[in-house]
Amino acid sequence: MANEQVVLVTGGTGLVGDAVRYILENSPEACYQKKENEKWVFLSSKDCDLRDAQATKNLFEKYKPTYVIHLAAVVGGLFKNMKYKLDLYRDNMLINDNVLFYSKEYKVQKVISCLSTCIFPDKTTYPIDETMVHNGPPHNSNFGYAYSKRMIDIQNKAYHEQYGCNFTSIVPCNIFGENDAYHLEDSHVIPGLIHKCYLAKKNNTPFIVSGSGKPLRQFIYSRDLAKLIIWTLREYNEIEPIILAVTEEITIKQVADAIVKYVGFEGEYKFDPSKADGQYKKTATNAKLMRLNPTFKFTDFDTAIKNSVEWFINNYDTCRK
Ligand code: NDP
């Protein structure tokens, strides 16, 4: 097709990539639908190991993308971050360096990469905003992952200043939704707890939540984030990062209560305060997003968690776990 624009989505098979595909295909709102002249390509690690420079070059040569939505990363929850600091640092540094370098080489018009609110300084003032990414060391529990993500922002600025590239980044808070990764030890808090609670119900055993249940977190539903990523592609034109988060903070106990409710678990349910809590809170503000996109409506947490639990139960045999 003449004027075809190729949108390459790295990490296209993950939680967020899958949600972007879903929204493009299913949203009733025209602003989130695929445009006629667009070809969206969703990649998995099987299509290309982005840690490998030559393989990444071959990928860019094959697709010659107009835009890149760079979601691929080695990610995990608190316990994976604590165990594999060096692996998370190295793998993500290699992936990001290759994707950004070949985006420059192949003259990609815009790259959107993904940071995270968990990479902000540990000792800080609240709320955290986009200007504070580099204002002090991250929490010790995830410094490998955090520094690799922070370097994306450095690279974006350097590519812009030296080569005029339009590379930017988004900063989501904790994400959850359909097609998450549900490993019992290494996953993020919501998918991990959904899986644990499901097994507790099935096996008639206690549901034990690691930590005190007190830490506060912000959670965004993957399908809301997907809409905001499409909006970022179409409407956001700064190099500076933009936080994509809800403002509401909830405790891990509130999360676990909602999971218990939708799994329908009626057995013994308790917390294990001998396990790490991680950072107590990481309150981020979405004021910049709300200024630029004031009409955006987030799905309420209860509906989103209900959808996520139902998806897990219906896809138990085949989901990532
Ligand atoms: P997932 O773990 O669900 O998916 C990761 C994706 O990256 C998969 O498509 C995976 O491919 C791909 N990938 C992993 N390693 C490689 C590699 N070496 N080469 C090529 N592709 C690779 O991640 P999410 O969807 O949860 O995360 C998307 C982005 O959002 C990431 O950048 C993450 O850092 C960020 N983020 C996530 C948060 C969360 O709570 N989940 C919070 C804040 C930010 P395959 O399917 O083949 O394994």
Image: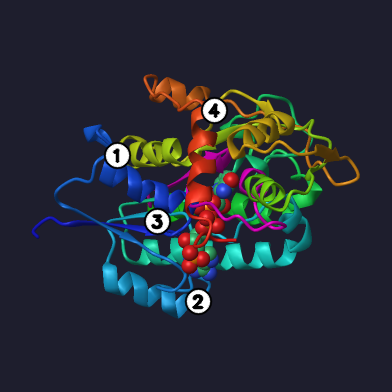
User: Which one is earlier in the sequence, the residue at label 2 or at label 1?
Assistant: 2
Residue at label 2?
A: 52
Query: Which kind of residue does numbered mark 2 sit on?
Result: Asp
Q: Is residue 204 above or below residue 99?
A: above
Please tell me which residue lies in front, 18 or 195: 195
**Which percent across, then down, holds residue 317?**
52, 61
Residue at label 1?
A: 234
Q: Seen from this angle, which residue lies furthest right?
A: 274
Residue at label 3?
A: 163
User: Which one is earlier in the sequence, the residue at label 4 or at label 1?
Assistant: 1
**Which percent across, then down, holds residue 68?**
36, 55
Q: Are marks 3 and 2 in contact (CB under 8 Å)?
A: no
Of badges 3 and 1, nearer the viewer stands: 1
Query: Which kind of residue does numbered mark 1 sit on?
Result: Arg
Q: Is residue 170 above or below residue 321?
A: above
Identify the image quadrant of residue 106. Answer: bottom left
Please tell me which residue lies in front, 197 or 107: 197
Magenta residue span: 165-192
Give the distance between the C-alpha atoms of the residues marked 3 and 1, in whole angstroms. Answer: 22 Å
